Amino acid sequence: MGFYGFIINDFNFVDELDFSIFEGSYSSTNTTSLYFLYNKKTNTYFESGIYGINLEFDSENKRIIEYNQCCAGGKQTEI
């Protein structure tokens, strides 16, 4: 459908590989995913509680940016 359903990345910027799963698509090009982070101590993954629309993970500045495209406009928010 033009979306990546499964992505491996370091979503919490701690040099461990985490993963995300596509959750849904909404108005315009808005999408959401579920993010699972790796816990090195227990060798397991847990749901992160990271939520937002069209999230971009900026590892250089260690920040998460949300891009919401809705209603003929756009909004950018740092999470």
Image (cartoon, rainbow, N blue to C red):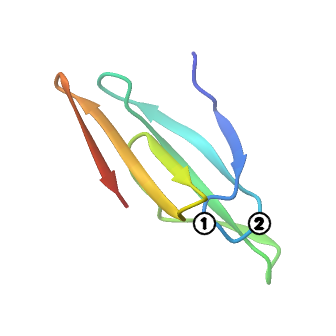
* Res. 70 image quadrant: top left
Work out whether residue 68 or residue 41 is closer to the camera in this orientation and state it: 68
Residue at 45 percent across and 33 percent down: it is 24
Query: Secondary structure beneath disc 2?
Result: loop
Q: Which residue is drawn at the image coordinates 35% and 40% (left, top)?
A: 67
Q: Position of residue 62 (x, y in %)?
A: 54, 65
* Above or below: residue 35 compared with residue 43: above
Q: What is the number of the mark on residue 12?
A: 1
Q: Is residue 49 left or right of residue 53?
A: right
Q: Looking at the image, which residue is at 38% across and 24% down?
A: 29
Pick out the residue farthest to the front: 60
Left or right of 31: which side holds 35? right
Residue 15 pos. (x, y %): 75, 67
Return the x and y of residue 6 as percentages of the image width and height.
68, 38
Q: Counting other residues with Cα less than 10 Å from the Cα at mark 1, is it few (<14), some (14-19), or many (20 or more)?
A: many
Cα–Cα gap, marks 1 and 2: 8 Å
Mark 1, secondary structure of its residue: loop
* Quadrant that contains the N terminus: top right
Where residue 45 appears, x then y in whole percent?
71, 66
Q: Are marks 1 and 2 in contact (CB under 8 Å)?
A: yes
Identify the disc placed on residue 16: 2
Amino acid at pointer 2: Glu
- Which quadrant is home to the C terminus? bottom left
